[in-house]
Amino acid sequence: MAIQKLYPEIRGTRTGYVIRFTCPACAAESIIVNNSPRDHFKKSRVASCRHCRTRLNIMTPV
């Protein structure tokens, strides 16, 4: 059984197929562009900051 890592949870904002979030470590804004409609409806996703590469759990509003 694989051990799941826990990442800090932060809130993102959704604008169409783009999710924006601000990294708490470096205070830089990053974006996630959804490529498929299935990814658009996920409630959370693990992503990394584009600037400092910190892994975060992004919570998105419905």
Image: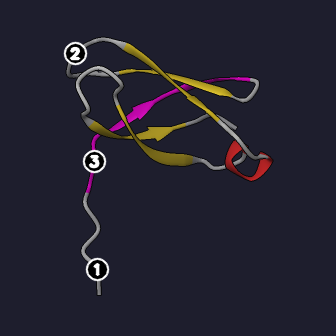
Mark 2 and mark 3 lie on one chain; the one further toward the N terminus is 3
Mark 3 and mark 1 lie on one chain; the one further toward the N terminus is 1
Residue 2 appears left or right of 16 = left
Mark 1 and mark 2 lie on one chain; the one further toward the N terminus is 1
Judging by the rendered image, the residue that carries numbered circle 2 is 26
Return the residue found at the far bottom: 1
Distance from the alpha carbon under mark 1 to that under mark 2? 30 Å
In contact (CB < 8 Å): disc 1 and disc 2 = no
- Foreground of the two, 20 or 11: 20
The structure residue drawn at horizontal position 73% and vertical position 29%, both measured from the top left corner, is 17
Q: Position of residue 5 (x, y in %)?
A: 25, 60
Give the colouring mode of the picture.
Answer: secondary structure
**Which residues are drawn in magenta?**
6-15
The structure residue drawn at horizontal position 26% and vertical position 32%, both measured from the top left corner, is 53
Residue type at the position of mark 2: Cys
Query: Quarter-wise, where is residue 14 in the image?
Result: top right
Q: Nearer the viewer, mark 3 or mark 1?
A: 1
Q: How many marks?
A: 3
Relative to 30, is 17 above or below? below
Relative to 40, is 24 above or below? above
Tell me, for residue 2, which label it has, or none.
1
Question: Magenta residues: mostly which secondary structure?
Answer: strand
Q: Position of residue 50 (x, y in %)?
A: 36, 24
Distance from the alpha carbon under mark 2 to that under mark 3? 16 Å
Assess disc 3: are there few (<14), some (14-19) or many (≥20) residues with their C-alpha within 10 Å of its C-alpha.
Answer: few
Tell me, for residue 7, which label it has, or none.
3
Q: Position of residue 37 (x, y in %)?
A: 79, 46
Residue 33 appears left or right of 31 = right
The structure residue drawn at horizontal position 50% and vertical position 39%, both measured from the top left corner, is 59
Residue 3 appears left or right of 34 = left
